[in-house]
Image (tube, coloured by chain):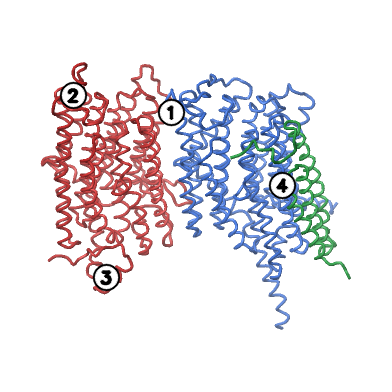
Amino acid sequence: MDLSNDLAAQLNAGAILPEGLVIVTLMAVLVIDLIVGRKASSWLPYVAIAGLFATVAALVLQWDNPNPLAFFDSFNSDDLSVIFRGIIALSTVITILMSIRYIEQSGTSLAEFMAIMLTATLGAMFLSGANDLVMIFVSLETLSISSYLMTGYTKRDPRSNEAALKYLLIGAASSAIFLYGVSLLYGLSGGETNLAQIAAQLAQGDSDQALGLAIALVFSIAGIAFKISAVPFHQWTPDVYEGSPTPVVAFLSVGSKAAGFALALRMLLTAFESVTVEWHFIFTALAILSMILGNVVALAQTSMKRMLAYSSIAQAGFVMLGMIAGTEAGYASMVFYLLIYLFMNLGAFTCVILFSLRTGTDQISDYAGLYQKDALLTLALSICLLSLGGIPPMAGFFGKIYLFWAGWQAGLYGLVLLGLVTSVISIYYYIRVVKMMVVKEPQEMSDAVQNYPPIRWNLTGMRPLQVGIVFSLITTSLAGILSNPLLTLANNSITQTDLFHVANAAAVETVAQVAEDADPVAQ
Amino acid sequence: MFTTQVPWLTTLILLPLVAAFAVPLIPDKDGKTLRWYGLGVGLVELALTVYLAATQFDRTAVGFQLSETYAWLPQLGVNWSVAVDGISLPLLVLTAFVNTLALMAAWRVSHKPRLFYGLMLALYGAQMGVFVAKDLLLFFTMWELELVPVYLLISIWGGPKRLYAATKFILYTALASLFILVAGLGLAFSGDRITFDLAELGLKEYPAALELFAYVGFLIAFAVKLPMFPVHTWLPDAHGEASAPVSMVLAGILLKMGGYGLIRMNMELLPNAHIHFAPVLVVLGVVNIVYGAFAAFGQTNLKRRLAYSSVSHMGFVLIGLASFTEVGLNGAMLQMLSHGLIAAALFFLAGAAYDRTHTLMMDEMSGLAQQMPKIFALFTVAAMASLALPGMSGFVSELTVFLGMANSDAYSLSFKTVIVFLSAVGLILTPIYLLSMLREVFYGEAKAETTPDHWFSDANPREVFIAVCFLLPIIGIGLYPKLAMTSYDTKTVHIAQKVGAALPIFATVEPQEMTAERDLFPLTPALIAPPLD
Amino acid sequence: MQLQLEFFLLLAAALFCIGIYGLVTSRNVVRVLMSVELLLNAVNLNLMSFSNFLDPEGIKGQVFSIFVITVAAAEAAVGLAIILAIYRNRDTVDMEQFNLLKW
């Protein structure tokens, strides 16, 4: 009796209640689809959305969990993971809203799509809290493999096939490289898989491990950088974004990326605490390259989805700035930016989906003169793009300001200046689209817009799309001006997380131990 | 500083912005409701501003008044903090005045009117925001916020080369405004206390290097807006292509934002760096005056000529700011106000002429005086004001700037002589190009292809009303400058003293120390001399 | 001579390098997939040897490698499925032919 109580206490299974809810939803979706069949497809998405909202509610209850460690320390449900899991769950909600019509129109099964999407969500959520190398690997692969499947979901479309293949090959290779780094880490720490214990072991380690540790660090970062699509590990991004179904891209650009950042924070801050200078250096290089290449190459794109791909690379560069700052404000600004990025990027993708559903194209030049035909879409897309470009008073401006503020405070003057310059460059390509939609005369309208179908919201799956657009429009325009609650949330998630003190505590412990060892000698 | 009074200034910012967002909801069946709506909002705003200036504002106080502070992003130390003082209040009134008249001038917009009025109102609110912001980040937000409507207004309702002009405008101003952010962040983080509040920033002590760096940053941003030679090239393009209401706002208000920024940031926050850069400002001001005048001379496009005349006139503001005397500073303020009125009037009338002739080329539009005598008369009065005819506001302000410069004890006599002489050359060129413009456009034989078939209609009562609204204060200030001066006199004296207080330290240091200082800041020309006795 | 940890690590590193080489040079998609499997096997070898030499009680490495094998199987299954789909559409598994997406 005692033993089982003890075991239950150690398992602390309540910490993964949100993930449990996702699993239940996933099963429900699969089983209902199996029993009821296609008739259920009209209300099945709402089951998934309800499940995800329950997940978010469970996450809210998890906030400030006094006992966050679960499953023998392999899962950490601290505030940092809660907020990242929240971002991921919300991104899935919006993605499902926008995918209903899209999947319907592509003639594939919605239930299966949602099942895979929920699996990916599950993997991403576990990844945000994973505190153990095995856990990290398994959840990372859950996310990755379901992402490959989603990418190739429209299997009759050769572009989708090709995107899936490229994503799979590059993804598998990068996770193998990541894994090799992880295996070295396991060896270097003398057989530990828990991140905190690895850190403690590494801190004691001698200097001849330096080469091994450097390889482990570089390989691990390669895997992480692939997930957050940082240059030069970004090659898959434009191809996959262009080829795969757009809702999948939306999820990859927000949910998957957020999970990648959560992994980066947890792994680099705990396990690689002893080589902070080195990983800061590597990330500085990644951030510089991402900001420059992402923004510059985006200028030349003609496809909207490709442009958004490069824009997401560049945005990752901005977010990395908060990580390099290495202060609490820096991490908080990362979380805050990701929260805002969730709304504005998903909003932009929702608009792109709506446009491609109505016209069947995603070329930027085909947006010409859209204002005359569809004012709501134009407004929403303009606001989201301007927000991505960081134009006040949209939400993105405040996100960037906070990032730059934190960076400047941490003394990263050069990076902040580069960020400022590149975000001015980015304004150009975002505004180009806005200009295309708004400024063009009626006679300069593209053929796609000239044949624009009458706006009908009563088709299956259109209503959720409309809800998604209006929701992200409102949040993107107001979340900046009224950003105080979000900012407080982001700050609390950082200040109330032990993660940023664990490494220090371990170091203190080591020092204490050394002192203890030394004491008898003195006596 | 928190008061429980009516949040006047917040209302001033939010009223046009909210009205702009409400534009899509206004029913506009006959196409007339919308313009009345726009004008109504403008008039309410103007009335509020005037009421505020007349009853709530204390002219004798130096510091910020009517402050309102609400926590906005406390984590960043950013507050929604607005206030007015002697510098911002006159410009605030000018903004409300010019914008309201611009809304009235935009009576005939038929192309996408909904978007047009929405953007104009948004622009209105953003400008008010720039002038009342007491928080650096709020200032920057408003500064950026005003760019987007202007960009769209030029690029949708502009002339044939509008896209080029609009892109040039956004590139110049957006890039330059970054420097505000960088310099502002630098100032905010200096010292042990992070603050974005302008009043608190003014009390901080900054390291010399940071002060110079921030000064340069602000100067670049505001110089583009002012516009100062050599970053003025966006202005003629933007003016040449923008429609009349947008030109009015552009020349009337946006250029003044540059001058306002120079006073508010560069002089108030960084008086020590101002000493080093003042000679540069003077030289650039003279270049502005002379170059602007010569360039205006070479233009064949009516609006481009007026744009270059703006460049020329804004040079006086620079000289006034750098004169280190309260008279000079007063003159600079007055020049901003007077140029805001005159340029807006000229651009409005140029737009009115364009509405009829559909060309801006002066060689294609001769002999208009016979057909439109009212426009001719009004145009002539406005041009006279612009060339500083005594009795008009332009004369008073430019004379005051000269007086301030001549009485300045910060510069050597020879330097002042050269400066005054060169500016006088510019002053002589102004009548030449303005009068030749009048001659080309209004006098002479009417062009054959325009006369026989259709007779251009003269100004209608609305247009006459708008022009007269501009001309009345121009003449009023010209005859009785105290009208405008009382509102900012106390404040300018205070700033001039603050800047001047930094001066003697520099002027009376030992010679060897001075060279040391100069080696440190090689940008400073050796123009500083002991005071004249 | 007793087998040392280094031997296993060097073997794993060699395997890893071969895998990378195959990844970079192969034109056949199936071969690329096989190279990825090689990489994962190198990792498994690493984990096993570390587990035996450094962590003989916990044997976390052995557990880890079980997971790696499982996940590798899943990955291979998904990979082959995708290859099959693309082969049906395009009638080829040559990497050079997949050039629809380009910047």
The chain that hosts pointer 1 is A
Chain shown blue: that is A
Q: Find the distance from the CA under tag 1 to the CA under tag 2.
A: 35 Å
Callout 1 touching callout 3 (CB < 8 Å): no
Indicate the amino acid at tag 4.
Leu
Which element carries disc 4, helix, strand or loop?
A: helix
All told, the count of numbered labels is: 4
The residue indicated by pointer 3 is B514
The chain that hosts pointer 2 is B
Callout 4 touching callout 3 (CB < 8 Å): no
The residue indicated by pointer 1 is A440
Residue A384 vs A332, above or below: the answer is above
The chain that hosts pointer 4 is A
For the residue pair C44 and A292, the one nearer the viewer reads as A292
Indicate the amino acid at tag 1.
Lys
Do the residues at discs 4 and 1 belong to one chain?
Answer: yes
Indicate the amino acid at tag 3.
Met
For the residue pair B7 and A308, the one nearer the viewer reads as A308
The residue indicated by pointer 2 is B447
Q: Find the distance from the CA under tag 2 to the CA under tag 3.
A: 64 Å
Which element carries disc 2, helix, strand or loop?
A: loop
Q: Find the distance from the CA under tag 2 to the CA under tag 4.
A: 78 Å
The residue indicated by pointer 4 is A140
Q: Is residue A9 visible?
A: no
Q: Find residue A127 and report its horizontal and vertical position in percent.
A: 69, 47
Q: Find residue A395 and report its horizontal and vertical position in percent.
A: 49, 41
Indicate the amino acid at tag 2.
Lys
Q: Find the distance from the CA under tag 1 to the CA under tag 3.
A: 59 Å
